[in-house]
């Protein structure tokens, strides 16, 4: 089925690139809105194959790039906007997600459908926060989600050096780029810490929630998933023995098929949605 591309205005006027797909021969059951993670983007790895699987299962699927994720307006798989990346914040990602939900809810083909937020890693934390506060969201699904934004910052002397210099750099292992993080990232977090508290959000979270994690996640420890379940007993938690942080996916992904771990993700998400919609 054809895939459509649009841009909507995001944080500080920077564009949010969106793609969406659905089977025009059937009526979709819901819209899945996917939030990518840190150093990620909507076309990373297996995300398009994943979206195709959900589309074939009867869902409309929408993916988007956060406005400050570092992907420029040209090649949607290249980090050509490192200045934008450096000035990203959690607040900006929440703003972007709300704008995508607002745009989606106004489209004729989507406005009568339930909206489900699904996020990977950092995007999972964003999906939890926005999913709780946005009345248009019916349910949330997280893949290897973080459980605490505050513990993702540098510590000790590294933090002191960051504050003094105003920037620190993280090397992108895939591209070799030195990716900046300005100290305004932390300042924004402190300013909006109450709104960015996943623990407090989950204490009163009342919508259906599915959390998927692997036991061998090298980037977000499996204990993060266990905390989500501990903080909200209604969370449906699935733990996989293996698959790593990206469920056996990598970028670029040249295989026409999904890896086994991602196939498990797709099947578990479909089963979850069949029970709640």
Image: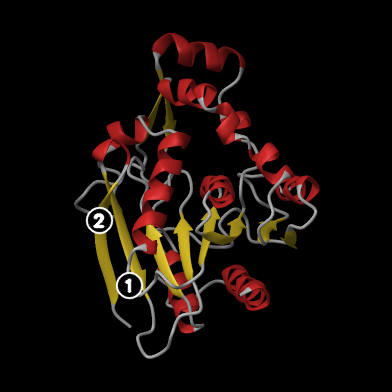
* Residue assigned mark 2: 7
* Residue assigned mark 1: 108
Please identify the quarter of the rendering in which residue 151 is found.
top right
Query: Up-down: is 60 above or below 143?
Result: below
Q: Find numbered disc 2 in the image and state the secondary structure of the residue it sits on.
A: strand
Please identify the quarter of the rendering in which residue 276 is found.
bottom right
Q: Horizontally, is 33 left or right of 75 in the view?
A: right
Q: How is the image coloured?
A: secondary structure
Nearest to viewer (mark 1 / mark 2): 1
Query: Up-down: is 245 above or below 200?
Result: below
Find the residue positioned furthest to the left: 74
Quadrant of the snapshot with the N terminus: bottom left
Q: CA distance from mark 1 to mark 2?
A: 17 Å
Residue 232 rendering spot, x and y as whole percentages? 76, 50
Q: Find numbered disc 1 in the image and state the secondary structure of the residue it sits on.
A: loop
Residue drawn 62% across and 53% down?
Answer: 144
Q: Horizontally, is 30 left or right of 266 in the view?
A: left
Q: Nearer the viewer, residue 46 or 276?
A: 276
Q: Name the disc covering residue 166, or none.
A: none
Residue 28 rendering spot, x and y as whole percentages? 45, 80
Residue 138 rendering spot, x and y as whole percentages? 57, 62
Residue drawn 59% across and 49% down?
Answer: 132
Q: Residues within 10 Å of mark 2 (few under 14, many from 20)?
A: some
Q: Residues within 10 Å of mark 1 (few under 14, many from 20)?
A: few
Is residue 196 visible in this depiction of the protein? Answer: yes
Residue drawn 45% across and 78% down?
Answer: 55
Quadrant of the snapshot with the C terminus: bottom right
Query: Up-down: is 180 above or below 97?
Result: above
Residue 271 rendering spot, x and y as whole percentages? 66, 77
Q: Earlier in the sequence, mark 1 or mark 2?
A: 2
């Amino acid at each position: 089925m054809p895939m459509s591309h649009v841009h909507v205005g995001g944080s500080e006027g920077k564009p949010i690139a969106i793609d969406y797909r659905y089977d025009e021969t059937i009526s979709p059951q819901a819209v899945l809105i996917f939030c990518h993670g840190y150093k990620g983007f909507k076309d990373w790895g297996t995300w398009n194959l994943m979206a195709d699987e959900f589309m074939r299962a009867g869902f409309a699927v929408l993916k988007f790039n956060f406005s400050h994720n570092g992907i420029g307006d040209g090649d949607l798989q290249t980090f050509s906007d490192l200045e934008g990346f450096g000035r990203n914040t959690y607040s900006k990602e929440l703003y972007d997600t709300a704008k995508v939900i607002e745009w989606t809810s106004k489209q004729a083909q989507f406005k009568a459908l339930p909206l489900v937020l699904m996020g990977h890693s950092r995007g999972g934390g964003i999906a939890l926060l926005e999913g709780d506060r946005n009345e248009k969201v019916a349910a949330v699904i997280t893949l290897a989600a973080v459980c605490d934004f505050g513990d993702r910052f540098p510590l000790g002397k590294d933090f002191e050096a960051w504050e003094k210099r105003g920037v620190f750099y993280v090397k992108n292992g895939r591209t070799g780029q030195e990716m900046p993080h300005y100290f305004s990232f932390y300042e924004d977090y402190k300013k909006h810490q109450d709104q960015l508290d996943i623990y407090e959000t989950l204490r009163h979270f009342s919508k259906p929630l599915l959390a998927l994690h692997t036991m061998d996640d090298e980037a977000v420890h499996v204990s993060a998933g266990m905390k989500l379940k501990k903080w909200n007993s209604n969370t449906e938690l699935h733990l996989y023995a293996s698959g790593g942080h990206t469920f056996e996916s990598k970028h670029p992904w040249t295989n026409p098929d999904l890896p086994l771990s991602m196939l498990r993700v797709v099947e578990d998400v479909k089963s979850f949605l069949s029970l709640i919609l």
